[in-house]
Structure formats: C-alpha cells, structure tokens
Amino acid sequence: MRLLEYQAMKFFGEYSIPAPGQVLVEKEEDLEKVSLPFPVVLKAQVAVGGRGKAGGVQLASNEEELREKARQMFQMQIKGIPVRKILVVEAQKVEKEFYLSFLLDRKHMLLFLASPSGGVDIEEVAARNPELIYQRKIDTWRGFSPFEGKIAAKFLGLSGELISQFSRIAFNLFRLLREKDMQLAEINPLALTPQGLVALDGKLIFDDNAYFRHPEMPPDESLTELEKEAKEVGVAYVEMDGDVAVIGCGAGLVLASLDLVNHLGARPANFLDLGGGASSEMVKRGMEIVLRNPRVKSIFMNIFAGITRCDEIARGIVDFAPKIPISVRMTGTNEEEGIRILKEAGYEAFSSMEEAAEQAVLLRGKGGN
C-alpha cells in the first residue's frame, strides 16, 4: 500500500524527521484552517507520479490565489484520479536538493540510497549519472548505524553540523521502515534550507500483509474505485491508462501479458489476476470490473491452466458474453473442453499468447469479437 504524502508526513513527524508546516484541506471550506505564512504550496494528494507536470503542485502568494487555485485543483483529475485532498505546505527557500531512501530489494534485501541529485526520479539519475548515487547494502540483522549516514553525508558534499543532521534523519527513516513494516521509505527531495535539512516530499509503501501488526495504519487511499471493488471481490486489479484489458491467472503471466501488449504498440488498460483455480463466476466478476473502465476497447485473456480449469474459464466468458472484442489464449487443464465451449459460442481460442495478443491489439475499434 502506497501512503499519500500527507500520511507519510505524519509518520515523519512521529520519527523526528523535519518537515515544513502543513495543513490538510479536504474541501474549500477547510481553507479557513490554513494559518501558514505566505507563500504556500498546494499539493494534490494522489498516489501517482508526475502530478507537478499535470498541475497538481502550485504556488500561492496570497489568500486570493490560495482559494482560486484550491478551487481549480479540486476540479482536476490527475491520470484519471480525482483530487479529493490537498496538502497546503509552507514554501521553503531551497538551496540544494538531495535524495534519501531505504528500500527492500530482492537481490540485496535492504538498500540504503542517497544522491546529491534530488527532486527527480532516482531511476533517471541511475540511467544518466550512476556515479551520483550512493548505494549500500544494509545487514538486516545488524541494522543501520548513524556512522553509515555520516559516510553518505560526506558523499553528498555536506559538512559541519549538516553531516550529523543528515545522519539523524537517515537513522530515523530507517527506524520508520523497520518498525512500521515499510517496503520503501523515501524522502525526495530532502532540501537544504537556511534552517537546515527539511523533507519536502515523502513516499512510504507499507507491506499490507503486516496490517495485523499495525492497527494504527490508515486505510489504503491510493486505490481507485474499481480497485477497491476488485479487492472486495477477491481479484488482484490495477487500473492503467491504456485501452486493452488484460486478464490472466497468475501474476507473472499477467505481467508478461502487459509487456507483450506494450511490445505490440498498444497500452494495457489494467492488470487483473484472477488467481489460481478461478471459477466461472470469478471470471464474470473480473470481466465486469475491467469493462467498467470506459477506455477499454478490447480484452486479452491469457490462461495457462494448472489448478485453473480451461472449461471453467470458457463458461465464464460465454455466460458473460462481453460486448466488446475479446481474444483468448487458452492452454492447460481441460484445454480441449474449454476450446470446444468457446467455439460452440462463436469464440476462437489461441494456443499462442503472441497470436492472441496480436489479435487483441488488432480488434481495438472493431464492432464485434
């Protein structure tokens, strides 16, 4: 679960990570609560990247600008997500921006990253200037030492009291990650201001398998309405910005299907994993969810059946009878029966995922399947 910025900032406060003064606004009337000195920055609370380029981060120099820009922001959608909350933050005089994070990594278990190039995606820095990234593997048994933070601070070019301040912030960010079961704890940018180092933005990703240990953790606000509904149904669904719906059984297979659709020049509309052993009823529920996305023009269903049965999948497709084109790849358990059911209903099934994906891409804009 990705926490929204205002939620991350609350945890930063609990762990003594310095941040600017801020007020959360959920409706225009809440602007009466804002008593911060001008100028202030309005930041849309949406769990997507690139909100600044989309107009989701704006500067207000006076109360009139604050009200007008807040009104406009509440009417916005950023990458399809409506803005329902705005964080109003005291503007800072920034002299330099840094990057700081701890993240769980399959190869190294736990990584400590820092860079003198803050304010941009760390992936961009890694691609263009890998020499600007300080990277250190952290022993999860031993933990993180403030001394390691001081070494990184010197790599960033900090000196004097700023070395100790950076080390404290890094140590507290590590404690937050470990004690709150975070998968990622990131400050970007960590800004150098006349008052010292200040976290201007933060990203926290919580391992929602650890909810039972953390009743204090907020509900997931990063989900779209369809994602919330899918979670209640029991399927793994992530909404995307394309027009080819992708459905499969098994996360790895669905991810490969997304890559294939992209490779063929189209964009996936979603990730939907029905899970192993999906019933025909689950297939119908999954298709109903993906088709409620108005951007969807065709469906690519990729089934490699093990504990899943092809005949169950086929019955779900035929019973639901989608009103837009669908291309099915089906192989595995009860494959022949599944293909027979589809053919009798007028559907064609492919044994090759490449052929099925090509068909789904070609079927966009067609009137039938």
Image (spheres, rainbow, N blue to C red):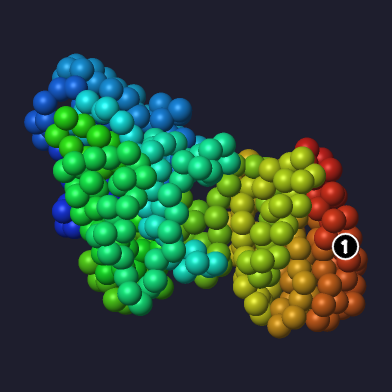
Give the residue drawn at x 77%, y 46%.
263
| Residue 101, image x, y percentages | 37, 52
Quadrant hosting residue 160: top left
Camera-side residue of 346 and 179: 179
Camera-side residue of 164 and 340: 164
Quadrant hosting residue 249: bottom right
- SS state under label 1: loop
Give the left or right position of residue 357, taking residue 17 as reference.
right
Camera-side residue of 139 and 183: 139
Give the left or right position of residue 87, taking residue 185 as reference.
left
Give the residue drawn at x 76%, y 52%.
260
Circle 1 residue: 352
Give the residue drawn at x 20%, y 54%.
168
Q: Is residue 83 shown above or below 245?
A: above
- Classify mark 1: residues with Cα within 10 Å, few (<14), some (14-19) or many (20+): few
Number of numbered discs: 1
| Residue 153, image x, y percentages | 30, 47
Give the left or right position of residue 158, taking residue 363 as reference.
left
| Residue 322, image x, y percentages | 72, 55
Q: Is residue 324 visible?
A: no
Camera-side residue of 280 and 115: 115
Give the residue drawn at x 71%, y 79%.
308
Q: Is residue 174 visible?
A: yes
Q: Is residue 65 shown above or below 7?
A: above
| Residue 180, image x, y percentages | 29, 67
Quadrant of the snapshot with the N terminus: bottom left
Three-letter code, disc 1: Ser
